[in-house]
């Protein structure tokens, strides 16, 4: 048999080496994809298990809140050190942390409208004025505060007629990316960022003081759980107060909380308050509670935020979301 020329043997060897190299790359890619797939499957299983632990923690929190309300339905105080204190739960292969806060001490954006029996949402001017006042207490210029309060009410109400400083369809249709107001209740506080005039800086400033409860009830403040830094909320609903005087009221709270609203309104700082000046919005008990859950399990991290309605018996989850709040 004739021996192939040397240059042909070299070409054949190069072809074999290229084939081997390609096969090695394909094998490495297949192994990497297998590794990723295995990791994703494990993470998926971990997330599902973490959700199961979170659901169990929800049940514990709901019954703990129920016990808190049952001890004294007329008064919710900070006794027992329950508010804002993280509690660790031992779980197999990971850690779980739960924290409960008063979820009602905030301005309810959905209170800017009133809901009729037929479901129509109409602007509530009284609440619009209170919201504008809250913003001015937080150093938003008065004219801007009025416009922002009107625009927020327009975002929620059912009609397409803008208030004096508000914004309806035309204001959003001319945006760089056109959109329309929701004309329904806000499902989450983060929705407020879409309202005309709300900048990232303004949202960051107001975020600790506002919420979107799933009701149109006027904002209520539990003065037995209100923190000093939340004093602007009290000043917003009691127009005779400013932030400093509202903070002094919070600091004057008895260690066990106020036993009656009559005692609260008898404080010297409140002597000038009108008979109807926010009195119906000041409470001694809490209906809404915020629950924060953090679960870490086998490399899977889960963060859950839930709103609990304690007016129901037993207390129930009104809203649930996952991930960091925006």
Image: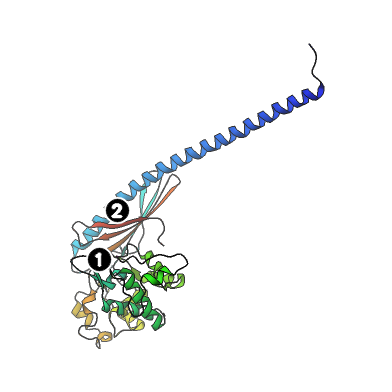
Task: Give the position of the C terminus as an image quadrant.
Answer: bottom left
Furthest-bottom residue in this view: 272
Q: Quadrant of the N terminus?
A: top right
* Residue furthest right in the image: 6
Q: Image point 46% across, 72% down: which residue?
A: 201
> Which residue position is annotated with label 2?
58
Q: Is residue 72 left or right of residue 41?
A: left
Q: Residue at x 81, y 22 (%)?
A: 6
**Does residue 97 belong to the magenta stretch?**
no
Gap between marks 1 and 2, in whole Å?
Answer: 22 Å
Disc 1 target residue: 215
* Quadrant assignment, res 21: top right
Q: Note whether residue 224 is visible.
A: no
Image mark for residue 42: none
Element marked by disc 2? helix
Is residue 182 inside the magenta stretch? yes
In the image, taking residue 57 as reference, residue 312 lies left or right, namely: left
Q: Nearer the viewer, residue 90 or 111?
A: 111
Mark 1 and mark 2 in contact? Answer it, CB < 8 Å. Answer: no
Identify the residue at image location x=43%, y=65%.
178
Q: Nearer the viewer, residue 12 or 99?
A: 12
Quadrant in which residue 243 is drawn: bottom left
The kind of secondary structure the magenta stretch mainly shows is: loop
Identify whether 304 is placed above or below 208: above
Q: Earlier in the sequence, mark 1 or mark 2?
A: 2
Residue 90 lies, in percent from the top left, at 36, 48
Query: Residue 47: x percent and y percent?
Result: 40, 46
Question: Residue 100, image x and y in percent?
Answer: 32, 61
Q: Which residues are magenta?
A: 176-184
Residue 14 pos. (x, y %)? 73, 28
Q: Label 1's element?
A: loop
């Amino acid at each position: 048999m004739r021996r192939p020329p040397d240059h042909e043997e070299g070409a054949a060897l190069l072809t074999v080496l290229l084939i081997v190299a390609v096969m090695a790359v394909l094998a490495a890619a297949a192994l990497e994809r297998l590794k990723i797939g295995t990791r994703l499957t494990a993470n998926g299983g971990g997330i599902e298990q973490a959700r199961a632990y979170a659901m169990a923690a929800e049940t514990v929190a709901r019954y703990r809140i129920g016990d808190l309300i049952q001890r004294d339905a007329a008064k919710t105080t900070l006794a027992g050190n329950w508010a804002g204190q993280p509690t660790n739960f031992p779980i197999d292969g990971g850690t779980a942390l739960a924290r409960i806060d008063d979820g009602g001490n905030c301005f309810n954006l959905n209170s800017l409208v009133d809901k009729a029996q037929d479901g129509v949402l109409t602007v509530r001017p009284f609440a619009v004025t209170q919201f504008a006042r809250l913003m001015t207490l937080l150093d938003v210029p008065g004219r801007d505060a009025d416009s922002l309060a009107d625009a927020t009410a327009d975002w929620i109400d059912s009609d397409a007629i803008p208030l004096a400083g508000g914004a309806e369809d035309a204001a959003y249709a001319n945006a760089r990316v056109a959109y329309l107001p929701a004309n329904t209740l806000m499902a989450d506080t983060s929705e407020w960022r879409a309202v005309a005039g709300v900048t990232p800086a303004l949202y960051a400033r107001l975020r600790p003081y506002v919420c979107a409860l799933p009701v149109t009830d006027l904002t209520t403040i539990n003065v037995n759980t209100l923190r000093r830094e939340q004093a602007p909320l009290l000043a917003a609903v009691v127009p005779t107060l400013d932030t400093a005087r509202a903070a002094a009221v919070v600091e004057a709270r008895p260690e066990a909380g106020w036993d009656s609203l009559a005692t609260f309104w008898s404080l010297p700082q409140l002597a000038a308050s009108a008979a109807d000046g926010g009195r119906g919005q000041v409470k001694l008990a809490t209906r809404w509670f915020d629950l924060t859950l953090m679960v870490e399990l086998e490399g899977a991290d889960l963060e859950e935020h839930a709103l609990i309605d304690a007016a129901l018996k037993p207390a129930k989850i009104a809203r649930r979301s996952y991930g960091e709040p925006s």
